């Protein structure tokens, strides 16, 4: 007989259960998922910051004020997002 989607696995939990430790902490699987999202957000912010720096530098080199301003705003947005991530980290620990 093939196991159904909701049948208990070897640990006794179904696939749909959120596994927690006795102290109510999330399991290692949930923790890994949260870390993946955190790293993804930080990488996204870093890419935005680097893209902004590139545009800003290109604007300076070509004396293009619009490109320079666009780069500065992109970099500023990435900096604000990084600050938000740091704030979230501070409240988690």
Image (cartoon, rainbow, N blue to C red):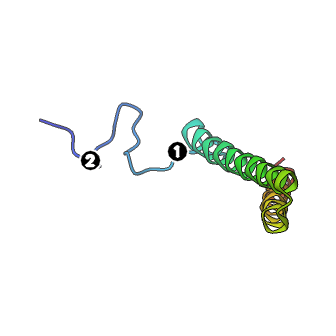
Q: Nearer the viewer, residue 22 or 1?
A: 1
Tell me if 6 is positioned left or right of 81 in this view. left
**Residue at left offset 64%, top offset 46%:** 40
Query: Which quarter of the figure has residue 21?
Result: top right
Mark 2 is surrounded, within 10 Å at the Cα level, by few (under 14), some (14 to 19) or many (20 or more) other residues, namely few
Label drawn at residue 28: none
Question: Going by the picture, which residue comes out furthest to the left?
Answer: 1
Q: Nearer the viewer, residue 65 or 17?
A: 65
**Residue at left offset 78%, top offset 57%:** 78
Q: Nearer the viewer, residue 54 or 84?
A: 54
Image location (x, y in percent) of residue 19: 52, 45
Q: Nearer the viewer, residue 16 or 90?
A: 90
**Residue at left offset 60%, top offset 38%:** 32
Q: CA distance from mark 1 to mark 2?
A: 16 Å
Label drawn at residue 19: 1
Image location (x, y in percent) of residue 24: 65, 48
Q: Secondary structure at mark 2?
A: loop
Q: Secondary structure at mark 1?
A: loop
The residue to which callout 2 is attached is: 5
């Amino acid at each position: 007989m093939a196991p159904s989607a909701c049948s208990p696995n070897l640990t006794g939990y179904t696939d749909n259960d959120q596994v927690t430790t006795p102290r109510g902490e999330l399991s290692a699987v949930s923790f890994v998922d949260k870390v993946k999202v955190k790293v993804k957000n930080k990488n996204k912010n870093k890419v935005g910051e680097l893209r902004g720096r590139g545009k800003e530098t290109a604007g300076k080199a070509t004396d293009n004020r619009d490109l320079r301003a666009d780069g500065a705003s992109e970099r500023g947005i990435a900096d604000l997002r990084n600050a938000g991530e740091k704030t979230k980290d501070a409240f988690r620990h």
